[in-house]
Amino acid sequence: MLGAPGVREDDLLNSAYTLTDTSRLGCQVQLSTDLDGMEVMLPRTDAKGMGTMTLDQPTPKIEKQWTAVPASVGSFKKRRAGVMAGVTQVAPDRESAMFTEARQLERDLEDQRALTSRLETELRELRAKGEMKSKKETKSKKATNSDESSDADEEEEGGLAKVKAELKHTLVEVNKIGRQVGFGDVIGLELAKRTLNEALVWPAVACPSLFTGVRGTPKGVLLYGPPGCGKTMLARAAAVELGETVSFFHVRPGDVMSKFYGESQRRVQALEELVREHSPAVVFLDEVDTLLGSRDGAQVAEHHRGVTNAMLEWMDGFGTGNERVFFLGATNRAEAIDEAALRRFGEAAEVGKPCEDSRMALLSHLVFTKAAEEGHSAKLNEADLALVAKQTEGYSLADVDRLVKRAFLQVLRDMPGGVKPGMKPADVPPVTTMHFEAAIGSSQGASALRDLLKKKQEKRNKL
């Protein structure tokens, strides 16, 4: 029998009780017949107790057991090589199955790679086809747009050509003008005639280099004044004075204005091209306040602004090159014209009501010269006509002209029985002062009527 354990041995055996479930304490004892019946203290987690070890104690046989965890490929290869010490080798049949499975996985991986490569190739082909299709569609669209643009351009050119053909009637044939009058035939209006001579006639008939630089002439002249004072007659006289030297265009508001939106600007463009083709040219804008009216105010229609802008752009001369185009305007309402248009004309000449001397000169021309040439007789002298000129204060030149016609018509009214068949100018008595007084008494003229209406309007405004 063994003796009682010592102090140190007792401490070591007692400390075993502090071990956990995961602790391992091994004890190896070699039994012999002399030590039969030895008692050994073993650590146990469930209870304390003595463990008795004898020679007859059964000893279990240790057999090999395979783990359920499959080995990795790397471990499998190492086991095959036999380089892993202390590790149980895998069974041959299991090894063959794992090797077959690994080969299958490798083949599946290769198939996946081949499939991925094939899909990527097909995707690139589809993208290439899509890009080619897109390029073709873009090219086709551009070609279609180009064709449409060409068609639109051709249609635009055709439309302008049609409008230009319609506007050819604005080109005046000077030799076909009914009243061939020059500046010498125009009574009075000396300032306006001098302005037109210097700004229009002289530069047209002289060498172009004469009127350049510091002697340059304005691009246009605006004639303004009451109706019937000779603005249109001055324009007609300017056309006669120029003759075939330049082209003369007589443009009225109806030639440009249109009820369709945008059509007026189109007609201005066509007129500009027509004038450029016939330059050097003079463009006479009759009733120019309608074409170049003020753009200010809420009551101004948008298409009127468009026409004014188109005309101003043309008159400004931007991009016209070396074409020589002169603008001559006439208006009864100068205050209604846009300020930018006034600047572009450069010069302005007032054509006001004639003075007494001008009315006397016109009366003498009509009674003593023109009437005599046409066979109409008159029994009047200079004093009689001076009296008539004094009585026609406020008359315009047109009013004086109509007064002379009414006086010569008054003779026919005073004849017994009136006009008879086959009557000739020689059969009519001469015109006297009495006939002029009757004509003046029957009508005060349109100018006097306008003055009367203006005075009444002023009185109403004061009220």
Image (cartoon, rainbow, N blue to C red):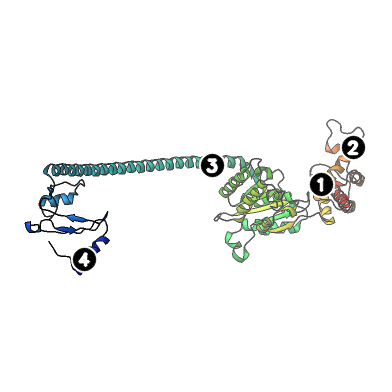
Residue drawn at point x = 56 percent, y = 42 percent: 160
Q: Amino acid at mark 4?
A: Asp
Kindly report the distance in space between the C-alpha atoms of the residues bearing marks 3 and 2: 60 Å
Q: Residues within 10 Å of mark 3 (few under 14, many from 20)?
A: few
Residue at x-position 16% and y-position 58%:
39
Q: Mark 2 — residue?
A: 413
Q: Please tell me how crowded label 2 is: few (under 14), some (14-19), or many (20+) other residues with Cα within 10 Å.
A: few
- Label located before the other in sequence (2 or 4): 4
Q: Nearer the viewer, mark 1 or mark 3?
A: 3
Q: Spatial distance from mark 1 to mark 3, Cα to Cα? A: 48 Å
- Per the image, the residue denoted by label 3 is 156
The correct choice, above or below, for 294 with respect to 16 in the image is above
Residue 10's tag is 4
> Which is in the foreground here, disc 3 or disc 2?
3
Tell which of 241 and 222 is nearer to you.
Answer: 222
Report the amino acid beneath label 2.
Arg
Residue 196 horizontal side relative to residue 134, left or right: right
The Cα–Cα distance between marks 4 and 1, rounded to whole angstroms, is 161 Å
Q: Position of residue 385 (x, y in %)?
A: 87, 51
